[in-house]
Image (tube, helix red, strand yellow):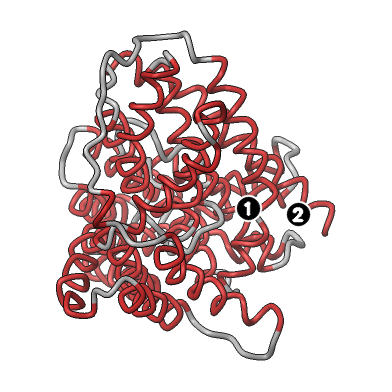
Amino acid sequence: MITTFGALVGLFISVILILKKYEPVYSLMFGALIGGLVGGADLLNTIEFMINGAKDIFPSILRVLASGFLAACLIKTGSVNRISEEIIKALGDKHSILGIIFSTFVLAAVGVNLDVAILTVAPIGLSLGSKLNYSKMSVLLALLGGGKAGNIISPNPNTLAAADNFNVDISNVMMSNVTPAIFGIILTLLLTKLLSNKGSKIIFNTLNKEHESLPSLFCSIIGPCTSIVLLSLGNFTDITIDPLIALPVGAMVSIIATNNTKNTNELMAFGINKMQGICLLLLGTGTLVGIIQSSNLQQSTIELLDILNIPQFLLAPISGMIMSLATASSTSGSTIASSTFSTAILASGLSNVAGATLVNAGSCVFEQLPHGSLFHTSGSSVEISLSERFKLLPYEITLGLTMTAVSTIIQLILL
């Protein structure tokens, strides 16, 4: 058994290396190696723990690859652009800021990577923000808040990891966080209006969209809708369809509906390219998970909760938050927390669905910290200054904490 100190050293080294801009995958692997050795294991056992941890991640990796195919179809066929533009058009200029929020919410909710959802809607958001004289901070918060709300109810890697490790249908985890997501949208709207005159203004922005080449709204949404219906069948029937099947089926429906069958191989290649970074990150995360799982960290955390008189059921959201704080990634945070603490969380009296739901919600609280990609990707999408990007962090954390708190209250009511 590896000591708690060794596991924490491994986690700390990984975070420091990531902050120093070293490759995250190797940073996680190196941190896992050092953590195992410092924690009292010999080299052979440390390697074995790392490999076993990586093995446990493979089901999630396969499902992430499957989600990449659907995401690629939505992005490359222009479906994401059509969906976001139709939402903006339906709400009109008067409610355009809500349109920006709802656009990233929908795109993230149907399985588009959060970074991609923000980059997709950002040009529209800048254009509308310029007309309404909104600040860059306000527009970026609208993008991020909507995306974070959509991310906790999506078939994205963070939700997949939580569902896998708690052995529940992903559709149950997605549905359980619908109410917290609604609260997230409402709070985002309020905070966005509060920030409308704070920070630098958008000077000028023009859209350069090829509207003629975009598919119709029906053709754009039929693919993700198919996947969501297939994933939800287990809630209403005896038929349970794994994301490994449901997501590619939705992708093929999208390809056929948008008349892109001749580009199928290109879309597959794009999907693999978009998800290979996440899959490698999951492998690196798995090696660190193997060390943490083989350590006393879980027991030490429970003892700390007892000392502080914190109810053990709060281990679910707290573990998600702490691991996302350490990794600045909802995917890694959800993966580490759900695989490491699932046994203790279930022992506290929470159901499998409740445990997965709360870990998933908690893992989205700190995903935008500077040692992760979302911080920089989102900032560049609206060309915001680094100082203003930092000023936005408290608002984003508030959004995440609010959704996690609502999710926790709901699960306690159902307990």
- The CA span between labels 2 and 1 is 8 Å
Residue 305 as seen in the image, left or right of residue 415: left
**Which is nearer the eye, 307 or 126?**
126
Mark 1 Cα shell of 10 Å, populated few (<14), some (14-19), many (≥20): many
Residue holding disc 2: 411
Q: Is residue 251 shown above or below 240? A: above
User: Which secondary structure lies at badge 2?
Assistant: helix
Q: Is residue 168 shown above or below 113? A: below
Give, as a three-letter code, the residue at label 1: Leu
Q: Quadrant of the N terminus?
A: bottom left
Residue holding disc 1: 358
Give, as a three-letter code, the residue at label 2: Gln
Determine which of the numbered discs, if any, sits on residue 70 in the image.
none
Res. 317 in view: yes
Q: How many marks overall?
A: 2
User: Which secondary structure lies at badge 1?
Assistant: helix
Q: Residue, x 19% and y 65% (percent of image)?
A: 270
Query: Tag 1 or tag 2, which sits nearer the N-term?
Result: 1
Q: Residue, x 31% and y 51% (percent of image)?
A: 35
Locate residue 375, reporting x and y percent.
33, 33
Locate residue 367, reporting x and y percent.
42, 40
Q: Is residue 353 shown above or below 189? A: below
Res. 322 in view: no
Assess whether mark 1 and mark 2 are in contact (beta carbons under 8 angstroms): yes
Locate residue 352, reporting x and y percent.
66, 68
- Could you say which quadrant of the image residue 310 lies in? top right
Locate residue 408, reporting x and y percent.
71, 47
Q: Residue, x 62% and y 46% (percent of image)?
A: 181
